[in-house]
């Protein structure tokens, strides 16, 4: 029997290739190196023109960096001839965004006290417009004190946890260890704008410091319908910590699966740009999302109304299903938030889910096991339907909607 060839070894650590670790190739010796072994972060690699590894540096000198030619393009090495449009997230874009005028979100925001945001209220009045709550009273929301710092997050979560960060000027995702992000955050002069918005910490020690708003717990499909004996792992999307530095920007989007969102600014400030999920706006959004020049077109100008909403320290905002929004971090900020599916707008949730399918949204940016939770909810609604004989119209409509999406994509009823 022939022997298997030994795995090829790379890097100064002489280990086999690992698909889960970022690596960079030396332009001199052509060997590959783990970024963590040679102190090169993934986001930093994009700024290197020619990389020289530690073995080659003594002879060939340090790595050569790319030359900046503009402040308005994701590829800052493009020659600035004045003809290329400004792209989202760049320094020029942020400056222009702050200079734009927007109608106030006061006309669409529903101001409420936390104790009034109840399941009965939302089932009676509907949950179609954003709700803003000025303080924690009555929300059932538990959080660390405003003195809680980025270093404290590292203490509770662990500096070795790998997190996704966004290089805002390039609108590009990369991975780095939380400890490295904390070092970056506390630099006197940050070399670039990095935004951390997807740290879900339900599986860390920090989970005990945060209690989700009571309304989100009561409405959440996952909390109410996910069975303990499920074949699939329970989705964790209810506890996110967002740490953004000044001028971080997230372009217009709809939260995955059409989820609703709770969002609390612990310290700092966020600016939301809100667009109603009308049929016309959703069609425009889908067209914009699939366009080749998406980053060059400010979606807020394609719709009739884009509202500006400033969310200050200590404020909680609840965004309903389907609302299209962009977010600017106007000053260094820590926020907590979470996503939840619910019964109050099943049709819109499914519309957003179908849109994700048409746009071929990567699984990484979709609600985990959306089809599974829809099946569990449909099963529960059917059992409720069988047990009740009156007032079932709403339940029946929700059940049929869920059955249709499951029948079309999973074959459960075929």
Image (cartoon, grey):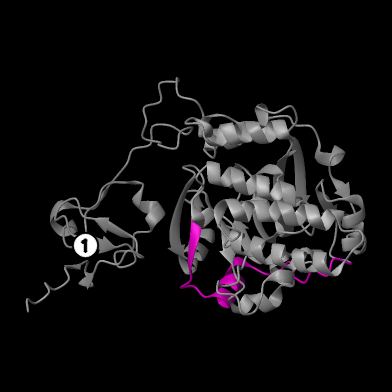
- Identify which residue, 297 or 50, lies in the foreground: 297
Q: Residue shown at 19%/57% (left/top)? A: 57
Q: Residue 226, image x and y in percent?
A: 67, 71
- Identify which residue, 14 or 52, lies in the foreground: 14
Q: Give residue 231's quadrant in the image.
A: bottom right
In the rendered view, would you say 287 is above or below 398?
above
| Residue 17 sits inside the magenta stretch | no
Q: Give residue 228's quadrant in the image.
A: bottom right
- Mark 1, secondary structure of its residue: loop
Q: Give residue 32's quadrant in the image.
A: bottom left
Q: Residue 97, image x and y in percent?
A: 64, 34
Q: Residue 372, image x and y in percent?
A: 60, 64
Residue extending farthest front: 414
Task: Indicate left or right for 160 with 346 as reference.
Answer: left
> Would residue 93 be seen by someone viewing this image from the given angle?
yes
In the rendered view, would you say 352 is above or below 268?
above
Q: Quadrant of the N terminus?
A: bottom left
Label 1 sits on residue: 54
Task: Indicate left or right for 292 with 281 as reference.
Answer: left
| Residue 156 sits inside the magenta stretch | yes
Q: Residue shown at 77%/43% (left/top)? A: 309
Q: Please provide the residue range marked out in magenta.
A: 138-165
Task: Indicate left or right for 301 with 80 as reference.
Answer: right
In the rendered view, would you say 247 is above or below 40?
above
């Amino acid at each position: 029997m022939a022997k298997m060839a030994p795995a090829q070894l790379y890097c100064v650590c002489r280990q086999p290739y690992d698909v889960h670790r970022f690596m960079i190739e030396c332009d001199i010796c052509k060997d590959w190196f783990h970024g963590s072994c040679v102190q090169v972060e993934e986001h930093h690699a994009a700024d290197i023109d020619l990389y020289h590894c530690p073995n080659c540096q003594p002879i060939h000198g340090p790595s050569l960096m790319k030359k900046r030619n503009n402040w308005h393009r994701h590829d800052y090495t493009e020659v600035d001839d004045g003809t290329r449009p400004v792209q989202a997230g760049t320094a020029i874009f942020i400056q222009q965004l702050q200079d734009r005028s927007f109608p106030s979100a006061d006309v669409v925001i529903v101001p409420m006290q936390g104790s009034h945001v109840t399941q009965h209220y939302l089932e009676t009045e509907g949950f179609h417009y954003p709700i803003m709550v000025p303080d924690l009273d009555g929300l059932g929301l538990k959080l660390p004190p405003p003195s809680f710092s980025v270093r404290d997050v590292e203490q509770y979560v662990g500096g070795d946890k790998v997190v996704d960060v966004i290089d805002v000027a390039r609108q590009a995702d990369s991975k780095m260890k939380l400890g490295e992000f904390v070092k970056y955050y506390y630099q006197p002069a940050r070399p670039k704008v990095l935004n951390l918005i997807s740290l879900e910490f339900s599986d860390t020690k920090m989970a005990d410091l945060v209690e989700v708003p009571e309304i989100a717990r009561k409405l959440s499909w996952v909390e109410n319908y996910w069975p303990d004996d499920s074949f699939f792992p329970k989705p964790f999307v209810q506890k996110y910590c967002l740490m953004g530095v000044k001028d971080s920007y997230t372009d217009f989007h709809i939260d995955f699966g059409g989820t609703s969102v709770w969002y609390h600014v612990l310290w700092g400030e966020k600016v939301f740009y809100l667009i109603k999920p009308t049929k016309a706006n959703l069609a425009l959004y889908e067209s914009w999302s699939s366009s080749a020049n998406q980053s060059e077109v400010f979606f807020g100008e394609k719709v009739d109304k884009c509202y500006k909403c400033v969310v200050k320290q200590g404020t909680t905002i609840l965004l309903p299903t389907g609302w299209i929004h962009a977010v600017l971090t106007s000053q260094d900020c820590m926020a907590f938030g979470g996503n939840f599916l619910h019964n109050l707008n099943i049709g819109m949730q499914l519309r957003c889910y179908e849109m994700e399918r048409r746009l071929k949204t990567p699984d990484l940016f979709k609600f985990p096991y959306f089809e599974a939770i829809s099946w569990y909810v449909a099963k529960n609604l059917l059992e409720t339907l069988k047990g009740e004989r009156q007032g079932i119209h709403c339940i029946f409509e929700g059940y049929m909607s869920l059955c249709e999406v499951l029948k079309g994509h999973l074959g459960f009823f075929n």
